[in-house]
Structure formats: structure tokens, C-alpha cells
Amino acid sequence: MSRVLSVAAAPAPDAVAHFAARLSYETDVSDVYADLTAGTAEIVVVDSRSGDAWRQGHLPGAVHLPTAQVPTSAGTLVPPGATVVTYCWGPGCNGATRAALAFARLGHPVKEMIGGFEYWVREGLPVVTASGLHRRPVDGLTAVGPSKDCGC
């Protein structure tokens, strides 16, 4: 018997609702990069990691706001009406989820960048450090290469 089919797939209307909901809560590094590159003013990308992690490297154009400081500092860093995109280390960390929850509790529209900083770096996207802008080689398991569209 099929393991995939041992639990039936959801009916199409339920699947539509589920996947549409996921896309309203999440975005990926490629889409964030595209919007940052295009200068999309309607989003504010927030790095919710510690100061040490921020200095190790962060996304160009990101705002540094550790999760614990969101309730007291979000109002000074996020313009009204902007959609917040949170990120933390990567899939093994729920810091971006906690930061997204804190922003939502304040009434901000928010999405979490799935993959976090780890996948940003693995896809060869630019990282800002004290010594400037850097890119690491693309991990072929995560992307086809910088500035190439994966088609998804």
C-alpha cells in the first residue's frame, strides 16, 4: 500500500485554503531578495537575531530588531502600513516565528522568511558585514545560481 496515499489528500477546496493561507504567512529568500533589489517600499525586513549575529552578517536593507525588543521598538522602526518580513538563523530556529508573532500582536501585517539567514547565504545572496558586502558560493542543493530564476 502507498505510504503517500495511506492518508487521502485533502479535497481541492481545502487544499486551496491551506496553501493560500501558508503563502499569506510565509515568503522565501528569493522573493525577499527580488523585493529588496526592486526597492519595494511596502516591506520592512527585520533581522530578529542578537547583536553578535547581526554583526556576523545580515541582509542588505534589513533592520536589526531582536525579538525581545519588538514590543518597545517596533513603532520607531516600522512605518505604519508596512508589511514586516522577519528572519532569524534558519529552519532550525523559531526566532523569526516568535518575532512575527510579536509584530502581529502589535497589529502589523507580517510574514516570516522561510529558510532564514542560512538559506539566504546558501543561495549566494549578498550579506553585509563590517568589511562590506559579501557573497558566498551558491549551494547547488538550494539554488541554481545568483540572478537565475528557479522557475517556481
Image (spheres, helix red, strand yellow):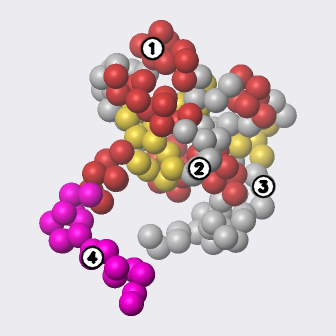
Task: Give the residue number, with chain letter if any, for mark 1.
Answer: 71
What x and y, as percent, mark residue 44? 46, 32
Q: Residue furthest front?
A: 1
Pair 3/2: label in front? 2
**Image quadrant assignment for residue 58:** top right
Q: Under tag 3, what secondary structure?
A: loop
Mark 1 vs mark 4, CA separation in Å: 42 Å
Task: Give the residue number, with chain letter if any, for mark 3.
Answer: 136
Mark 1 vs mark 3, CA separation in Å: 34 Å
**Image quadrant assignment for residue 94:** top right
| Observer-nearest of 13 and 147 | 13
Horizontal side, residue 101 vs residue 118: left or right: left
What x and y, as percent, mark residue 92? 62, 47
Task: Give the residue number, with chain letter if any, for mark 2.
Answer: 91
Q: Residue furthest right?
A: 131
Region of the chain picked out in magenta, as a range: 1-18
- Is disc 4 in contact with disc 2, using a CB cutoff of under 8 Å? no
| Observer-nearest of 11 and 66 | 11
Label 3 neighbourhood size at 10 Å, few (<14), some (14-19), many (20+)? few
- Is disc 3 in contact with disc 2, using a CB cutoff of under 8 Å? no
Task: Give the residue number, with chain letter if any, for mark 4.
Answer: 8
